[in-house]
């Protein structure tokens, strides 16, 4: 008997990706439910070559599923993830709500797969922030080889990270500029079309934004609490695909050549790195891909034991939906039992 899975937030950017990736996964799936808010009940969503009708989160019986893949926003997760766990299902939650809870594992399978066993505490596993996931997949093999002291990262984050409404606004602003229509930013603080905005999520007392704090705190929880991270997170006018410029200082010497060969053989990564026109990956090329791409690997001539690299990944896939399904696959490989509270267990 396969797993019965609820995708909660099935009509959002990440929810639709989770359904697609589930349909492509080797996971033994018996039944998938598309769960959404009341306003989307009855709406059809694609699950591979099938169509699923959305059912109502408020009335759905979660004792009939073994896993709930959540991407419905922080407020919904705060209320519903514990409720769903209490119904006996294991929740893999994409919001930031549970990530720093000491009783909730924060998991990137290529980095800290064994942490997934911590799900037994609260029945909840947290999926990290998209910009954190792609970075730690790249950092992990380098950290194991030469022990990372400090990371300085600048991100170039596509608007899809903020949901469909942001994608619609970029499109409208771009059209507005070409057609000389006047427009006022709605979801963004300033014009995003043909512009970049150094502000994602809210500002904190430190002067960092919460997105920058997430990259710091989550990397310490997933990879190593001793690794120092300084982040600047920027919204750029692309639709899908986050890019990052990463400067990494190591305890030990690590040449660019050695790093390149190490990354080339590491899980979840694809190295495209030639010092020539087009010898690197750009966000439009990562869309729909599972891999995190690494380019521009080079020594930092201004500081010993320090490398620079460029990291690009589909923020809706590895940054969210794919990592979530990979965590589900980890649980299945660990023979996760079916929901004991199901009537037909
Ligand atoms: C963003 N990382 O890009 C945040 C949330 N997905 O908007």
Image: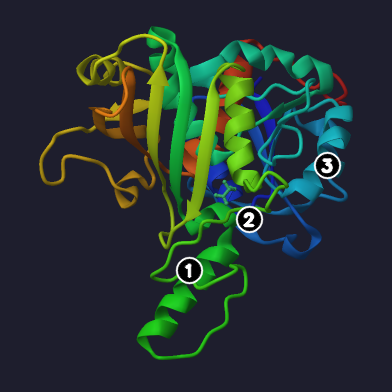
Question: Mark 2 falls on what kind of element?
Answer: loop
Instruction: Please give left or right for residue 182 compared with residue 257 in the image.
Output: right
Give how far across and how far down residue 299 sits, in percent: 25, 25
Question: Mark 3 falls on what kind of element?
Answer: helix
The residue under label 1 is: 192
Report the residue that reaches farthest toward the left: 276
Label 1 CA crowd tier, 10 Å (few <14, some 14–19, many 20+): many
The residue under label 2 is: 11
- Corner quadrant of residue 71: top right
Answer whether residue 19 is visible to the viewer in this image: yes
Label 2 CA crowd tier, 10 Å (few <14, some 14–19, many 20+): many
Q: Is residue 148 above or below residue 88?
A: above
Instruction: Please give left or right for residue 262 compared with residue 44 in the image.
Output: left
The residue under label 3 is: 78
**Disc on the earlier residue, 2 or 3:** 2
Q: Is residue 319 above or below residue 46?
A: above
Label 1 vs label 2, nearer the camera: 1
Label 3 vs label 1, nearer the camera: 1
Q: Is residue 314 above or below residue 332?
A: below
Residue at x 48% of width, y 70% of height? 170
- The quadrant of the rendering that contains the C terminus is top right
Question: Mark 1 falls on what kind of element?
Answer: loop
Residue at x 58% of width, y 67% of height? 188
Q: Is residue 263 above or below residue 188?
A: above
Instruction: Please give left or right for residue 238 compared with residue 168 in the image.
Output: left
Give how far across and how far down residue 78 sits, in percent: 83, 42
Give how far across and how far down residue 37 sits, in percent: 77, 57
């Amino acid at each position: 008997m396969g797993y019965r899975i609820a995708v909660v937030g099935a009509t959002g950017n990440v929810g639709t990706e989770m359904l697609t990736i589930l349909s492509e996964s080797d996971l033994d799936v018996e039944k998938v439910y598309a769960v959404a808010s009341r306003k989307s009940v009855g709406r059809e969503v694609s699950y591979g070559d099938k169509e699923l009708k959305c059912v109502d989160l408020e009335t759905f019986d979660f004792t009939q599923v073994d896993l709930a893949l959540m991407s419905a926003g922080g407020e919904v997760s705060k209320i519903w993830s514990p409720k769903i766990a209490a119904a006996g299902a294991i929740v893999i939650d994409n919001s930031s709500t549970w990530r720093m809870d000491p009783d909730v594992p924060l998991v990137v399978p290529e980095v800290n797969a064994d942490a997934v066993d911590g799900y037994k505490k609260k029945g909840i596993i947290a999926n990290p922030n998209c910009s954190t996931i792609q970075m730690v997949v790249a950092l992990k093999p380098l950290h194991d080889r030469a022990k990372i002291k400090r990371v300085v990262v600048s991100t170039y984050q596509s608007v899809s990270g903020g949901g469909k409404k942001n994608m619609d606004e970029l499109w409208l602003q771009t059209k507005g500029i070409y057609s000389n229509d006047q427009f006022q930013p709605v979801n963004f603080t300033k014009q995003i079309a043909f512009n970049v905005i150094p502000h994602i999520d809210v500002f904190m007392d430190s002067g960092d934004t919460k997105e920058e704090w997430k990259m710091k705190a989550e990397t310490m929880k997933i990879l190593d609490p001793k690794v120092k991270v300084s982040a600047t997170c920027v919204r750029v006018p692309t639709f899908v695909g986050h890019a990052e410029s990463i400067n990494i200082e190591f305890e030990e010497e690590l040449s660019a050549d050695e790093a390149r060969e190490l990354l080339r053989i590491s899980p979840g990564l694809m190295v495209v790195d030639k010092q020539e026109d087009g010898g690197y990956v750009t966000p439009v090329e990562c869309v729909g891909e599972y891999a995190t791409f690494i380019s521009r690997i080079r020594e930092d001539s201004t500081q010993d034991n320090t490398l620079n690299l460029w990291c690009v990944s589909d923020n809706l896939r590895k940054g969210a939906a794919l990592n979530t399904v990979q965590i589900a696959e980890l649980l299945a490989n660990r023979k996760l039992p079916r929901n004991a509270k199901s009537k037909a267990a």
